[in-house]
Image (tube, rainbow, N blue to C red):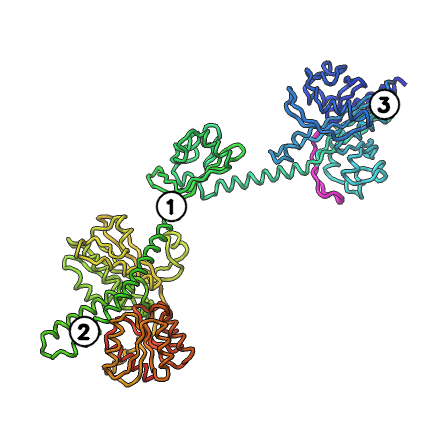
Amino acid sequence: MEKRLRKSLEFAENIINTVREPLIALDQDLRAVSANRSFYEFFQVKPEETVGQLIYDLGNKQWDIPKLRELLETILPEHTTFDNYEVEHNFATIGRRTMLLNARQIEQAWGKERIILLAIEDITERKAIEAGLETTRKELAVVKKIADAAHEFADSVINTVREPLISLDQNLRVVTVNRSFYDFFKVKPEETVGQLIYDLGNKQWNIPKLRELLENILPARSSFDNYEVEHNFATIGRRTMLLNARQIEQAWGKERIILLAIEDITERSRLEDLLEESEFRYRRLFETASDGIVLLEKQQGHVAYANPAVEKMLGCSEAECQGKNLHDIGVPIDARDFSATMQDLQREGILNYEDILLKTRTGKEIYTDIYMVNRAHLAQCNIRDVSERKKLQSQLLHSQKMEAVGTLAGGIAHDFNNILSVIMGYGDMVLNTLATDSRARGNMTEVLVAAERAADLTKRLLVFSRKVAAEVKPIDINKLILNLQKMLNRIIRENIEFHLELTKTPLIVLADTGQIEQVLINLVSNAKDAMPEGGRLLVTTRIEKMDEAFIDAYGYGHPGRYALLTVTDTGLGIDAETQSKIFEPFFTTKGVGKGTGLGLAISYGIIKQHNGYIKVYSEPDEGTVFKIYLPLCDEAVLDKKPESSAPVQGGNETILVAEDEATLRDLSRMVLESFGYTVITADNGEEAIAKFLENQDRIDLVLLDMIMPKKNGKEVGEAIRKGSPEMKILFSSGYTNEIVTDKEMREVGFEFIQKPYPPKSLLSKVREILDQ
């Protein structure tokens, strides 16, 4: 009996020391009876400081834990067992730990009434993972067992352990299995005990790596820890396990058994893989990002890492950056103590700095957006080059300003055209009353010439404002330049060398010939003025293809093929400040009385109206290059020959004239009545409708100004057409596209005459419409 008792105790002792969880046995006075090796190792205590001590006094009273007292003195006396009792405590030796306590009151084998068996599972790391902190290895208690003389005591220990635990005989058949094994692998006792381990679960356990452990590794060793096995189980899916195996003597006579503890590390492996993948992706992003990324240590703000984009952007390599602060590498975002910045960063999570001007080691200045992000161990500083964005914003602002000025110019031109119509109309009438030999006739002719020049000026303003439609047709840019060569030669002084380099390929574009000629004359005239001491002037053409690379490189354009017209001079050049203003109306560097300041502004408007681009490249004393891009078209049509104008004729029809400008209204009435027409007048839209309704049976034609108070010309025309669909209507305006295009008007029977117009033009247009 003593021998069998000793064997039982040895068996229990082997089980206790196989269990990886700390395990301690207490008598009814709560004094330590025994503890396993894991307990001493984990809590860093010695047997002589433990056995016989009151549990609360262990480790200089480290174990005087209120929740432990509650378990041992309040809860456990009412229960024979109690599982998963969570306790958190700060130990002086091992720090703050979170533990699950599993307690069981059991009979001893050596005569005392009962003892308390306490299994301790450290779940500190698991709790940290569940809280989303750094993923660390979950430490699950391996097997909790305590030996006693009896087999029941060993079973109590086994079933106290939360990890799956299985014991095998030397034939690798299952001897006993704990409750956790059944729960975890979803099997029943009758399907397990006595079975060959490889046959368990319809041979789910026939795992090659398990065979290697049991048949090759373990026979040569008494124990083997942390043997990793991955397998896809039909019942629970793919799992990754750590096996801890030990060969021990049994207490019931057989020679030896194999004790196998199973730790499921599937979730931990998954988290470790995710962490590794996340680190890899972050490293790849860090290395390949176009933004400069600097990682700073949080104490002094020194650079720990810098990606390749930092060197490309600032000219400072990672080795040169390390150990320096942001100021040292040219990033002036922190004028205070770095600790104050870190306090702001920890409070806000992210700090933004916009439009920060950086100066690189090469002296280049770039605008950047910088933001700092608080990471776990380092602060991340991202630097983004936004110079191109600033450039585009500047271009947008310039475009909006040009649009606003264009609208203003269009309004001025429209009003001025009304005045010019009066001057030209009355001037023409006066001219017709003067004798052929009258001296006043010559004076009046000069007045009309001046009016025509003023009309041409307003037309140029309308072109700039894009309020008049270009008369586009397919033209060859090369032929246009050759036809204009003689005129250009007259503009250029003798001390300037003038050359043409035109591509042999026809460059067909849809354009208004007169407007493109005007642009070229403006550019050549400016080039002449930029070379007072002489120089060289070159006009070239070629085909330019705008693709994504071109657009990315130059910051403008739309994909397609363009005719590129370049005007290059070797003159005084243009500084950057002047370049930013040269396309503004009335801006000139030629001095008072030497220029209108409209040439380049009008050129800008013409090219924009033709869906093209005009760009300038210049530096002081290095000459200037103007580049004009016009979209190419593939087909050309022959120009129609102009029809000969018919002589002016009158008539006896009745015409309704609606015009808010009194002088122009009276002039139109006088001109029409002088050629036999009956005229009814109205000075606003509502009056025009009322007079039409009063006289619609005798009105043959309605002349409507586009812009009138109360109702505009378009609204009046639509109202008239509702009641009289066949009524003939003639619109007039200072610019053409304020309502509809010429094509749209013709489709619904509307006609149009552009202000300013001489009396003959009005009479011809009226007769043309009435005779249709």
Residue range (magenta): 221-240
- Callout 3 amino acid: Glu
- Callout 1 amino acid: Ser
Residue occupying image coordinates x 30% and y 79%: 680
Q: Is the residue marked by circle 2 packed among few (<14), some (14-19), or many (20+) residues within 10 Å?
A: some
Q: Where is residue 98 in the image (x, y as percent from the top left)?
A: 67, 28
Q: Mark 1 vs mark 2: which is more N-terminal?
A: 1
Q: Which of the 4 image quadrants contains residue 609? A: bottom left
Which quarter of the rendering shows the C terminus? bottom left
Q: Is mark 2 on a helix, strand or loop?
A: helix
- Callout 2 amino acid: Gly
Q: Distance between the residues labelled 2 and 3?
A: 132 Å
Q: Mark 2 vs mark 3: which is more N-terminal?
A: 3
**Mark 2 or 3: the one toward you:** 2
Q: Name the residue under label 3.
A: 107
Whether residue 239 is in magenta: the answer is yes
| Furthest residue in direction right, as rendered | 1
Q: Name the residue under label 1.
A: 387
Q: Position of residue 189 (x, y in %)?
A: 84, 37
Q: Which mark is residue 427?
A: 2
Q: Horizontally, is 91 left or right of 413 in the view?
A: right
Q: Is the residue marked by circle 3 packed among few (<14), some (14-19), or many (20+) residues within 10 Å?
A: some
Which quarter of the rendering shows the N terminus? top right
Q: Is mark 1 on a helix, strand or loop?
A: helix
In this rendered view, identify the residue nearer to me: 648 or 515: 648
Q: Horizontally, is 185 left or right of 577 in the view?
A: right
Q: Residue 519 carries which label?
A: none
- 470 in relation to 258, above or below: below
Principal secondary structure, stretch drawn in magenta: strand
Q: Where is residue 259 in the image (x, y as percent from the top left)?
A: 78, 30
Whether residue 623 is in magenta: the answer is no
- 473 in relation to 123, above or below: below
